[in-house]
Image: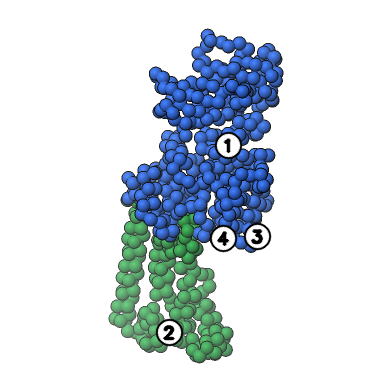
Chain colours: A blue, B green
Amino acid sequence: MTHLPLSSHSDELGEQIELSLRLQRPDFALDISLNLPARGTTVVFGPSGGGKTTILRAIAGLEPEVQGEVRVKGRTWQSGNVFLPPHARRVGFVFQHSALLPHLSVEQNLRYGFKRVQGTELEYHECIEQLDLQPLRHRKIAQLSGGERQRVAMGRALLTRPEVLLLDEPLAALDAGRRSEVLGYLERLKLVTPIPMIYVTHAVDEMSRLADYLVLMKDGRVRQSGPALEVMNSPDVPLALRDDAGVVVIAHVSREHQHGLFSLCTAMGELFAQGGTHRTGDRVRLRIHARDVSLSLSEHRDTSVLNILPVTVQSVRESVSGQVLIQLGAGVNQDQALFARVSHASVERLQIRQGLRVWAQIKAVALLAG
Amino acid sequence: MVLPPTVLGFYLLIAMGPNGFLGQTTAALGFGTLAFTFWGLLLASVLYSLPFVIQPLQAGFAALDPVVLDAAATLRASPLDRFFSVVVPICRPAFLTATVMGFAHTIGEFGVILMVGGNIEGETRVLSVLLYDRVESMAYTEAYWIAGGLLIFSFVVLFLMHVLSQRLARREAGV
């Protein structure tokens, strides 16, 4: 576990969200203890039914049976006999199916919480602008698309001046087109708002794009937690066993070429990627799947693969379906993590072992915005 | 709801009488006994019609998505605030149905009323009892007028309810 004791943590107590939650049901048990940073986006990731939603609902005070403690930025919301009711907690909650008030218009939904916290018109118009809600204001809820509903739900929650914004799989009920649209708004929100977000999902792409801090959950327990890139790029976590295992790399667009090709400056060296509408200087996240990385003993230049890097084998591990996950070190110091998934036969033929220097051919680099 | 009205009326009459627990309570509070008074009649009618009011309300509340109430709670609405700003407006058709059902059911009641209220002019003589009274004393012309009036009234109530619920349904659909 990368969970650090409080004394060695650089954050002050006031800057944290401290959770210690327990719930015992016949078919389900939750038992977690977490200190999350009260800034940036924390993604709680794990399979369905693992207790992720229960954590969010407990933070909001919607699960009174959950025992334990909830402290946000030094303020106690729940502890022992103290239980602040949901309406007294400064949270914003975005539900999976938006849960807009069906008898009210968009404008009335946005103002429902807003007038109860007596926000200023300036805040209201700022929020409307950030989420492009102006054209929707006078519509009825029944006239909104799924993506628009979630945008209204996000705006409605943000307008209550929350100390933490809780998002429960806000994209799970949307089709692919709407998903990427709302994901774009979430990324924009992440940049402009200082409000910390706790985001629950079981989708790898949402996790890769949004997470600053990552909590991996399974069966009601925390498997691993820590800074997102550290957790995502560690070969020890359950993520590495998944079919879509891979690493996430921070990159800067260093050059734009013809035909939508970019040069990217990363810790593992220069990479080429295609797609998106990025400009020189933009900071982006890349995801490189283990299944898209192959290995060769010599540097092939007679190949269609653009991205070929010198790497060092750091470990060889069993993976799913009889394959082997190879942890590689790339970059100047050969310490930037990269994974390759190859067959047992290849490992034997190339005699891949720890310390071997090989060439990694990266067939695809997925650009994640933000 | 399955209790015959006269049976309910009989027990209420006993309870409201000088030896019943209701009668003794009201007497001790200085109101006298409730039997054969307007207030006794009112109490009996409320009891008798309550199931017809509760049923539509219960159905309305059951149809309410609890997540919407959770959302209102995270938007800083207290429980009472949630009741008036979310439950009442969303369940408006249920409240309407309950009101009309309760009213229509009460106005047509006969058994309970005759038992508890009797037939005292200016005090407990309601329309349905008056109708019975006129028929008994062979005053058929008057009986025709009362019966016809009640009939028309019932139709008007039904019609209004139909129109209102349609209008509400249309508003719900967002057209």
On the image, the x and y values in percent for residue A309 come to 57, 18
Structural crowding at the residue carrying mark 1, measured as other residues with C-alpha within 10 Å and reported as few (<14), some (14–19) or many (≥20): many
Q: What's the amino acid at mark 2?
A: Phe
Q: What's the amino acid at mark 4?
A: Leu
On the image, the x and y values in percent for residue A298 come to 61, 11
Q: What's the amino acid at mark 3?
A: Gly
What's the chain of the residue with tag 3? A
Whole-number angstrom distance, CA of label 4 to CA of label 1: 31 Å
On the image, the x and y values in percent for residue A114 come to 41, 56
Whole-number angstrom distance, CA of label 3 to CA of label 1: 32 Å
Which residue in the structure is indicated by mark 3? A80
Q: Circle 4 — which element?
A: loop
Residue sitting at x 66%, y 44%: A8
Q: Circle 2 — which element?
A: helix
Which residue in the structure is indicated by mark 4? A84
Q: What's the amino acid at mark 1?
A: Ala
Image position of A70 with respect to B19: above or below: above
